[in-house]
Amino acid sequence: MNNTTPLTQRYNPDVDTVVNGIMNGDRQMLSRAITLIESQRREDEQKAHEILDRCLAKKNEAIRIGITGSPGAGKSTFIEALGEEIINQGLRLAVLAIDPSSKQSRGSILGDKARMERLAGRKEAFIRPTASSGCLGGTSPKTHEAILLCEAAGYDVIMVETVGVGQSEVAVDTMVDFILLLMLPGSGDELQGIKRGIMEIADAVAITKTDGDQAGIAAISRAEFEAALRMLPAKHSFWQPQVFLTSAITGTGIIEVWQNISAYFTLMRKHDTLEKLRHQQLKSLLYTLLEERLKREFFSNPEVTSSKESIERQVLSGQLSPFTGANTLMDAFMRPLKSL
Amino acid sequence: MNNTTPLTQRYNPDVDTVVNGIMNGDRQMLSRAITLIESQRREDEQKAHEILDRCLAKKNEAIRIGITGSPGAGKSTFIEALGEEIINQGLRLAVLAIDPSSKQSRGSILGDKARMERLAGRKEAFIRPTASSGCLGGTSPKTHEAILLCEAAGYDVIMVETVGVGQSEVAVDTMVDFILLLMLPGSGDELQGIKRGIMEIADAVAITKTDGDQAGIAAISRAEFEAALRMLPAKHSFWQPQVFLTSAITGTGIIEVWQNISAYFTLMRKHDTLEKLRHQQLKSLLYTLLEERLKREFFSNPEVTSSKESIERQVLSGQLSPFTGANTLMDAFMRPLKSL
């Protein structure tokens, strides 16, 4: 397939068809719309935004859960176990999973190993790997837009998996309602190394792989995390994050985690907090989109493109400092505005 | 002290004094200049850039090392051990350590525990916590600027500590020459969970805390990491990243890690790669600074500030989609430019 052919020229259902498909639960149409969102082509993006505009009009409220944790914490297997529990409750589930691609080369170390196979076989589930290339912790405005599409498609629960433990979670925190932090047994033994940034956005902590000979260490870790959580300021006045011992193999703790999440959403709705959170999330998306548009305008500006190379050369040769270089380019962009 | 008072109004040495101080190895002047860089005030920033412009003129080439790893991997103690080894070689060392602050609240969970005390007592060392608030993995253009100042001050080796394991390392990769990844024993047991993004920017891996009863697990982890590294594309044709077993307590492996880093820089210079890398780093800084300036211009633009609130309100009430809202604001900003 020719990669330069826009998606819209291959099989090109119109906006109406895609929107109707999404709203009628057609998973292929949903998948197609997410592909349009992820496309780098302007015409695909334009179409994606028309679809999104139409989908936003239909307000479906889903439970949005961010699942985060260090590499090796067992995110995929945990999501499978929790996902099956959710489906067994009669709910429909969408998972926006991290496609383990990277900035320099694509694909995970062990190749394109199929992930979450069991869950993918369920008709109540929609599993979609999202491109994480170059984005903060694997989330981007495109992830946020994919969440909105899944909501329009009527999924009751949307899980967003993120890579890494660090500031990256701050990005997913702007698009989900509940953050579940997965930690390995023994990882609590150096709490001074665990930065507040990670712990304080967690609404619950699940210690994973607590089966077998890890049980003892897991219990200690639980106490350590509980102590750390108590020292943090409350994210919501009505919610104290809890720590759960879980095992995706034995099923330990999975129901408890789900009950905890359900209780959280009951309280969120009672306190009108969910609506406020939706507002914050939309605002955050607005400003992220603005930044993207702004950069695009700047780098396609004729004044900028005509002087960019020469300035770059002067910076690299040491004739100009990066600060003076940046100022010169900005001045070129802003001159028409300032002279009015 | 009144926080709104600009730093320059308290004790206000002029640019000449600061620049001369830095070049003469005055650590307090260096520290003052970094504080100016980190200041949010325009006048401080202006002064900081004058200082930087002057410092850039003096080309000192330092070895820039990024030290990264998960929370709990023992970054501080490892940096202390490696730092002492470096000083014992007769070199001067600057460490830009992560100040464990977070986006929502400041300070680490266990309070402002003094870090790297032993190293801080050495006159050949300069330890500086850098603000990590809200920045990708704790690094920002300000970190890059601090590196340039440390080079002007004549430090031979500059270490930059970063938080987290994930896409965040991609940011530090744009400002350092060598990335050392610290991993705990046992963390290699799930390599499919370790994303390429982390492994492929590492120039060496040090498994930490391999003393005591961790020795067996550490040896297995080493083999696993070595196997994973062999599967990755080479970052440099002349360099194959190695895995070291280390212990900051017993001193195991610390000299070996330093010898490996030294060998890398010898090869880098031989292949003219270091100069190319410096160019990439300067270019990256130029564009990061541009993005910052661009956002500032946008959000201080009168057209934008006058319509921002109304558009935000319409987006939150569902009258406008975030996409249409972003387009409307961009059009307001660009109108004077487009109409010329």
Image (cartoon, coloured by chain):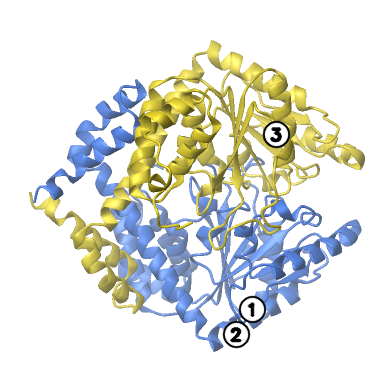
Chain colours: A blue, B yellow
The residue lying furthest to the top in this view is: B270
| Neighbours of disc 3 within 10 Å: few (<14), some (14-19), many (20+) | few
Q: CA distance from mark 2 to mark 1?
A: 8 Å
Q: Chain of mark 1?
A: A
User: Residue A128's quadrant in the figure?
Assistant: bottom right
Q: Which residue is tagged 1?
A: A239
Q: Which residue is tagged 2?
A: A267
Is residue B116 or residue A130 the one in the foreground?
A: B116
Q: Secondary structure at mark 2?
A: helix
Residue B121 is tagged as 3
| Neighbours of disc 1 within 10 Å: few (<14), some (14-19), many (20+) | some
| Neighbours of disc 2 within 10 Å: few (<14), some (14-19), many (20+) | some
Three-letter amino acid code at the position of disc 3: Gly
Location of residue B328 in the rendering, given as x and y in whole percent from the top left corner: 23, 64
Q: Chain of mark 3?
A: B
Along the polypeptide, which appears first: circle 2 or circle 1?
1
Is residue A233 or residue A203 the one in the foreground?
A: A233
Is residue B328 or residue B62 the one in the foreground?
A: B62
Determine whether label 2 and label 1 are within 8 Å by CB. yes
Q: Residue at x 30, y 37 (%)?
A: A326
Location of residue A196 in the rendering, given as x and y in whole percent from the top left corner: 63, 59
A304 vs B278, left or right, is: left
To the question of a shared chain for discs 3 and 2, the answer is no
